Image (cartoon, helix red, strand yellow):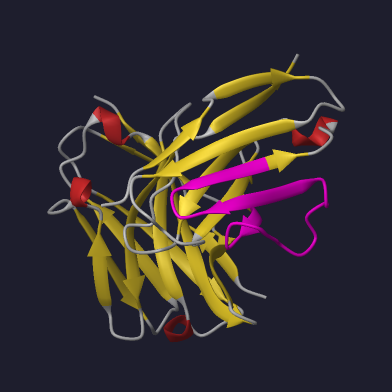
Amino acid sequence: DIQMTQSPSSLSASVGDRVTITCRASQSISTYLNWYQQKPGKAPNLLIYAASSLQSGVPSRFSGSGSGTDFTLTISSLQPEDFATYYCQQSYNIPRAFGQGTKVEIK
Amino acid sequence: QVQLVQSGAEVKKPGASVKVSCKVSGYTLTELSMHWVRQAPGKGLEWMGHFDPEDAKAVYAQKFQGRVTLTDDTSTDTVNMELTSLRSEDTAIYYCATEKRDCSHGVCRIIFDYWGQGTLVTVSS
């Protein structure tokens, strides 16, 4: 099974900061990588699919990059509504493993 | 527009079983690929299994093999997740989610696009 490892597990940042979260797959997954945002008490919400494609309706301050085993989610200018937990997920094969999550907190 | 409505919260004793249902509306069940994901309190998302209503086949995470069963009831457009031999570590919110797959201009999108509202299962003596 493919394992997904995110880093960091948490970070503190201020409004306006640039934030970067990384995700590593235990084997190559091409660009079959999605990023989800989850807020407390809510189901996850898709931000990025196929490593770098922005889901419709998602603000352009979110971007994704990478291929193979190493991927990055970047928030170019953190907004108050972006404080949440972020998960990567591989869609290369079954099981559809998630990373362990990165909690973005207010500094 | 797909809507997924899950059954209500459950409290179970260790060793018991639980069945969580996920009712689909806005789409025909056999047109959807269904996954189940759980989230323990304060923890991350954990993929449990996949059910394809088109052929009624299920694939399970190795961790849950032998304890989880995914089934469907096409007469009510419902997918069910049953987890047996419950232990305290199974206390979690259980989500159903549909998977969408499409490709355009060389980019393939395989995503969980619709989620149920979640069902809290509490295992406690």
The quadrant in which residue B105 appears is bottom right
**Residue B50 on image: x %, y %:** 34, 65
- Is B37 a magenta residue? no
Region in magenta? A46-73
Residue that protrudes farthest toward the top in the picture: A107
Q: Is residue B65 left or right of residue A44?
A: left
Q: Is residue B34 above or below residue A12?
A: below
**Residue B31 on image: x %, y %:** 47, 85
**Residue B97 on image: x %, y %:** 49, 61
Q: Is residue A26 left or right of residue B43?
A: left
- Is A67 a magenta residue? yes
In the rendered image, is residue B7 in sight? no
Quarter of the image that includes the N terminus of chain B: bottom right
Q: Is residue A92 left or right of residue B99?
A: left
Q: How many marks?
A: 0
Residue that protrudes farthest toward the right in the picture: A16
**Residue A40 on image: x %, y %:** 63, 34
Quarter of the image that includes the C terminus of chain B: top left
Q: Is residue A107 above or below residue A44?
A: above
Residue at position x 32%, y 62% from top?
A: A94
Residue at position x 49%, y 45% from top?
A: A70
In the rendered image, is residue B16 in sight? yes
Q: Is residue B15 left or right of residue A65?
A: left
